[in-house]
Amino acid sequence: MFVFTIKNIRLQKKMSISKLSKITDISRTYIRELENNKRFNVSLTILYKIANALDVNVKELFYTKYDIDTLKEELYKKINEFGLDSADALEISQLIDLLINIDMQEKNK
């Protein structure tokens, strides 16, 4: 299972989903599902299209368990800035949970 960074990269590049969709010829719905970690069975062809459109390496489209500490720092900043119930804090918290669950599943194999 993967946890994608596509949304964060796209927002950093100030690119809309519509523009990314147009550049890659991938539907907005499909991109949104990837960004929200609702779809995991993505082909390398699609990942290459997205990476090229965002001008990043394919491996940058994924979070790893090594990003947990960085995400925790970002979570604390968002909580201080927007509050515990903010959408930003919730999204980062969910990413951390996904990464921890993936790490635990790998250790139990």
Image: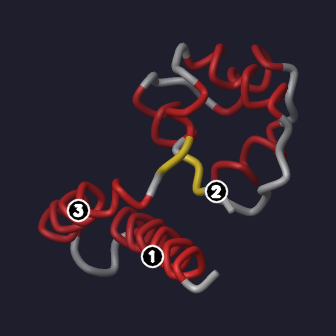
Question: Percent position (x, y) of residue 80?
Answer: 12, 68
Q: Residue at x 20, y 70 (%)?
A: 79
Q: Amino acid at mark 3?
A: Lys
Foreground mark, 3 or 2, reads 2
Residue at mark 1: 100
Helix, strand or loop at label 2? It is: loop
The residues bearing labels 3 and 2 have C-alpha atoms spaced at a distance of: 24 Å
Residue at mark 2: 2
Q: Amino acid at mark 1?
A: Ile
Question: Percent position (x, y) of residue 67?
Answer: 34, 54
Above or below residue 106? Residue 43 is above
The residues bearing labels 3 and 1 have C-alpha atoms spaced at a distance of: 20 Å
Question: Percent position (x, y) of residue 61?
Answer: 56, 37
Residue at mark 3: 78
Q: Amino acid at mark 2?
A: Phe
How many marks the image carries: the answer is 3
Which residue of the protein is positioned furthest toward the front in this rendering?
109
Helix, strand or loop at label 3? It is: helix
